[in-house]
Every structure is written in structure tokens, then in C-alpha cells.
Image (cartoon, rainbow, N blue to C red):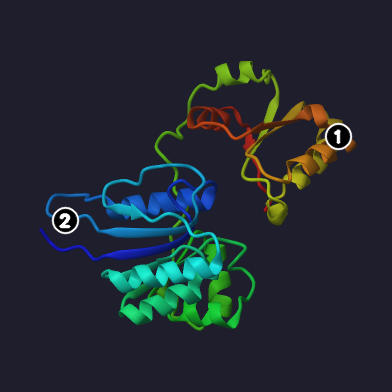
């Protein structure tokens, strides 16, 4: 059996976290830890998240340390972990953590991988973040757009910046959504769907733009319902917006839902919309 390299993963959210980035991190780390084929050792991975509100057991080969939400406490814990164990790779799950990840990689003589997602990497970042990313052995981007943005401000060889898209779990396959349509009273309706956390700091996702478009769609004769899945501190504002535009009965805020309902929601949607 071949020896597998050890990885330290610095992340905002992973196992027990919520949202798209947390899911991306779980999928990515689980794929690395999967032995895949006989004779290949499971890569030992230590994960240090900033947040983990839910209790979820990581898969075999992954150890997750309890979260450290404060920046100073998080940095001290990351340094302490790195000082006491072997680290061959440092995986940085968010650009704003890149300076810390780069420092640890240099300290341990480890390879550095930095993940970029979207809005955090589109504008030119701070000098420390830029230098950390330019020192990375590999930069992963979820889209070609994000990759182009990174190459626009970073002095880094293009071959070290790769696109690794968000993945889709095998449960998300086409199927019959009639039961959920009936349960939610959506028979005969055109269903628009948005799935995502509604946070006042993340209004760029565009929930309000869809709500503002509804009066024109309805006036044009479209019998449309906008289904919104997710929660957050911006829900009240969006409900008030829908009420003020006279389309509150056309917007269904369904909150957080389980996997089965989430799959069903995608199946009943005529169009997924997120004008980010």
C-alpha cells in the first residue's frame, strides 16, 4: 500500500456547516479521502472550520477539529495543529484565509492549494491575499468566469489555475414531481426556483430582482409562482418587498428543507433562477 500525503484543510464551513461552500468542501474532501481502488491509502485529512452549527460525522479518513469562530483564536489553533502533525498539503477553502494558509505551508514546507468561489475573488483583493494566492501551487476555481477574474489580478502561471466546478449529487436526477406540486398547490403553475441562504451581506444573489420582475411577468399573462428555499436574516425584507409589489401570494418562502424535498423542488421547477 502506498503512503498517502497528509492534508490540513482551513475552511469557513465543512462538515456540520450550511450553504453551498460547505457542501462543496464536503464533496471535495470526501472525494480525496475515498480510497478509490485497492492499494491506495486513504489520505489523512485534518479539517479546521470557522463554523459548524450542525453535528455531522466526517467520513473515514477525515478528522474535523471543533470550530474556532474568532479570527485570532482560529489562527492560533491552526498554527498549533500544524506544529504538532505532519502536513504535506495545506488546502485553503476561502481567499480571505489565504495569508494564514500560505504562512503555514511555508512553515511546514508543504504544497498550497487555494480554493476560489465567486464574488470574493472577482475584485482585486488585498495585497496579502494576492501574494498568498500567487504563492500557491494550485488554485481551484468553480467557474471559468472566476478563473478569468483571478488571472486578471494575480501574477500566476495560468496552468496553476484550474476550474473545478460545483458537483451534483446522484440523487438530483429528473423525476416525477407531481406529489410535491400537489402538496404545495402548484398544479398548472409556472414555477421559478431559487435555492440559497438569504443573508443581508449576500444580496448580490438576486432574490429581490426576481421578485421585482414578477409584476411584469404576471401582467404579460404568465401564471407564475416563485418558490424560494433557504433561510437567513434577509427573509423579512424580501417578504416586505413582495408585499409592497402586490405579489406576496406569488412568492413561497419554504425555509430550509431536507434532501428529499430539495430534490423534489428541483423536479417541479420550470426554471432555476439566481441572477447573481
Q: Residues within 10 Å of mark 1 (few under 14, many from 20)?
A: some
Look at the image and tell me in which quarter the N terminus lies: bottom left
Res 25 → quadrant? bottom left
Left/right placement of residue 270 relative to residue 112 reads: right
Q: Nearer the viewer, residue 89 or 75?
A: 75
> Does residue 161 appear in this view?
yes
Q: Nearer the viewer, residue 218 or 248?
A: 248
Q: Nearer the viewer, residue 97 or 118?
A: 97
Q: Residues within 10 Å of mark 2 (few under 14, many from 20)?
A: few
Residue 29 location (% of width, % of height): 36, 54
Residue 10 location (% of width, % of height): 43, 64
Tell me the residue at 72%/45% (across/down). Answer: 207
Res 107 → quadrant? bottom left
Tell me the residue at 48%/79% (across/down). Answer: 132
**Which tag, 2 or 1, sits closer to the chain's start?**
2
Figure disc tally? 2
Left/right placement of residue 217 relative to residue 34 reads: right
Q: Nearer the viewer, residue 106 or 148?
A: 106
The answer to whether residue 91 is above or below residue 155 is: above
Residue 91 location (% of width, % of height): 39, 66
The answer to whether residue 263 is above or below residue 274 is: above
> Does residue 154 appear in this view?
no
SS type, badge 2: loop
Left/right placement of residue 265 relative to residue 209 reads: left
Tell me the residue at 13%/50% (across/down). Answer: 38
Q: Which residue is mark 2?
A: 40
Q: CA distance from mark 2 to mark 1?
A: 57 Å
SS type, badge 1: helix
Tell me the residue at 17%/56% (across/down). Answer: 41
Res 192 → quadrant? top right
Residue 216 location (% of width, % of height): 85, 38
Q: Which residue is mark 1?
A: 243
Amino acid at each position: 500500500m502506498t503512503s498517502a500525503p497528509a492534508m490540513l484543510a482551513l475552511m469557513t464551513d465543512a462538515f456540520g456547516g450550511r450553504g453551498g461552500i460547505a457542501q462543496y468542501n464536503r464533496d471535495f474532501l470526501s472525494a480525496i479521502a475515498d480510497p478509490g481502488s485497492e492499494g491506495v491509502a486513504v489520505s489523512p485529512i485534518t479539517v479546521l472550520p470557522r463554523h459548524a452549527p450542525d453535528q455531522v460525522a466526517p467520513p473515514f479518513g477525515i478528522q474535523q477539529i471543533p470550530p474556532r469562530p474568532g479570527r485570532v483564536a482560529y489562527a492560533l489553533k491552526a498554527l498549533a495543529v500544524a506544529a504538532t502533525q505532519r502536513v504535506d498539503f495545506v488546502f485553503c477553502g476561502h481567499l480571505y484565509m489565504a495569508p494564514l494558509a500560505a504562512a503555514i505551508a511555508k512553515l511546514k514546507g508543504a504544497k498550497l492549494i487555494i480554493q476560489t468561489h465567486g464574488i470574493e475573488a472577482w475584485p482585486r483583493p488585498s495585497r496579502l491575499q494576492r501574494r498568498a494566492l500567487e504563492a500557491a501551487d494550485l488554485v481551484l476555481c468553480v467557474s471559468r468566469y472566476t478563473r478569468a477574474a483571478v488571472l486578471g489580478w494575480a501574477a500566476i502561471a495560468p496552468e496553476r489555475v484550474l476550474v473545478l466546478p460545483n458537483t451534483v449529487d446522484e440523487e438530483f436526477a429528473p423525476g416525477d414531481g407531481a406529489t410535491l406540486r400537489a402538496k404545495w398547490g402548484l398544479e398548472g403553475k409556472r414555477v421559478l426556483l431559487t435555492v440559497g441562504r438569504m443573508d443581508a451581506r449576500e444580496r448580490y444573489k438576486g432574490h429581490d430582482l426576481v421578485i421585482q420582475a414578477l409584476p411584469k411577468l404576471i401582467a404579460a399573462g404568465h401564471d407564475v409562482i416563485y418558490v424560494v428555499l433557504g433561510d437567513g436574516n434577509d427573509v423579512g425584507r424580501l417578504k416586505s418587498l413582495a408585499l409592497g409589489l402586490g405579489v406576496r401570494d406569488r412568492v413561497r418562502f419554504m425555509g430550509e428543507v431536507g434532501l428529499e424535498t430539495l430534490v423534489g423542488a428541483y423536479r417541479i421547477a420550470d426554471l432555476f433562477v439566481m441572477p447573481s
